[in-house]
Amino acid sequence: MDTPLLEVKDLQIEYKGRRSLKAVDRVNFELQLGDNLGIVGESGCGKTTLAKSLLGLLPDNGSVVGGAILWDKTDVSHYSENEWNRLRWSDIALVPQNALSSFNPVYRLRDQIVEAIRAHESISVDDARRRTEKLATMVGIDPQRLMDFPHQLSGGMKQRLVIAMALALNPRLIIADEPTTALDVVVQDRIIRQIVELQNELKFAMIYISHDIAVVAETCHLIAVMYAGQIVEYGLTSAVLKKPIHPYTMGLKNAFPELRVDKPLISIPGHPPNLDPPPTGCRFASRCPFATELCRQSEPPMVELPSGQKAACHYVDRALELRELAAKAETWRQVPAG
Ligand SMILES: Nc1ncnc2c1ncn2[C@@H]1O[C@H](COP(=O)(O)OP(=O)(O)O)[C@@H](O)[C@H]1O
Ligand code: SF4
Ligand SMILES: [Mg+2]
């Protein structure tokens, strides 16, 4: 097996404030070039925090307090801003959620992309312009539109150019954090298809973050399900979504229409727990219809099946039975409110 491009080991990230909060807690995964990992989970589960740590973009009150981020075998988790500047964009690039914040309204789009490329690479203006035009074509934008100002393009077009920017220095990892959430569904769909095509063609590794499990089903061959700062299930997307072994994944799957043709939507009652401090035992216990005293007392270990699919639940061996129960609305109605 090749050395992974990225290895996240027991990663812990804390935000300091009036009370400290561990937004990411003992997260493990690795990526090879060409891998395509989707990270899903409800809002507040730590997805963006994890993404930011992989780009050296944690805010001042956030820091890595445990574990490691190995990029090409080097631990970058405590890199300085200068060290991150060398890595960010050229090796690991971000497609942010909001394209609007990526462009300055008073400059033509072409000039902004050219300047950004030249800030990282010694390349002539003409060469940078040629590359910019090629990138625009790759993401389906007529290069002539590069002479426009940002407000002259639709949200979808701007988001395509943000993707073009992320590709500009040929990075080995692209992290897309809810890249289409602000767009309407049709545009969203087209852009997602484009990202998948580019990834197949250029073979970079990708981490695609979304609260929408159906989007990840379409986009990624690996999936990590995050809950309350932790990965609770991990594996091949096809396997995890067809046969989830963690009740949280079973619940998430119920809530998305694309994955439940002709079936009623069932949402998971309640909200993710407060993490200061985190609940003892399983963090999902207060919302889980299958929780027992054991779940409330003791934190479930991550269990790996022979197929490589993993989940942190005490009852992985009852997954078949729990899946059948989890598909019924009355099962979730039994969860006490609060
Ligand atoms: N700058 C910050 N300071 C303190 N807490 C934060 C900060 N940013 C995020 N958080 C908290 O960290 C947790 C994870 O947030 P986030 O990573 O944004 O989750 P997600 O992307 O899954 O919605 C949440 O409880 C959120 O309130
Ligand atoms: S450990 Fe218990 S509470 Fe947690 S997901 Fe499994 S069954 Fe539910
Ligand atoms: Mg987020």
Image: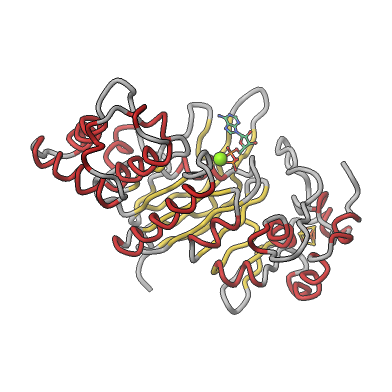
* Residue projecting furthest to the top: 106
Q: Toward which corner of the image does residue 44 lie, by quadrant? A: top right
The x, y position of residue 113, in whole percent, is 24, 35
The figure's colour scheme reads: secondary structure
Rendering coords of residue 249 (x, y %): 68, 60
Q: Where is residue 162 in the image (x, y as percent from the top left)?
A: 35, 40
Which of the two residues, 179 or 245, is positioned nearer the viewer here? 179
Residue 158 falls left or right of residue 274 = left
Residue 194, by quadrant, is: bottom left
* Residue found 80% across the figure and 69% down from its top: 322
User: Is 315 located above or below residue 125 in the figure?
Assistant: below
Which of the four quarters of the rendered structure image does ligand 1 lie in?
A: top right
Q: Where is residue 158 in the image (x, y as percent from the top left)?
A: 37, 37
**Is 47 positioned to the left or the right of 145 in the image?**
right
**Is 60 situated above or below 199?**
above
Residue at image point 75% right, 72% down: 319
Q: Which residue is drawn at 75% across and 61% down?
A: 247
**Does residue 258 appear left or right of residue 171 in this picture?**
right
Quadrant for the C terminus, please. top right
Compared with residue 161, is residue 147 higher up or lower down, i.e. above or below?
above
Location of the N terminus (image quadrant) = bottom left
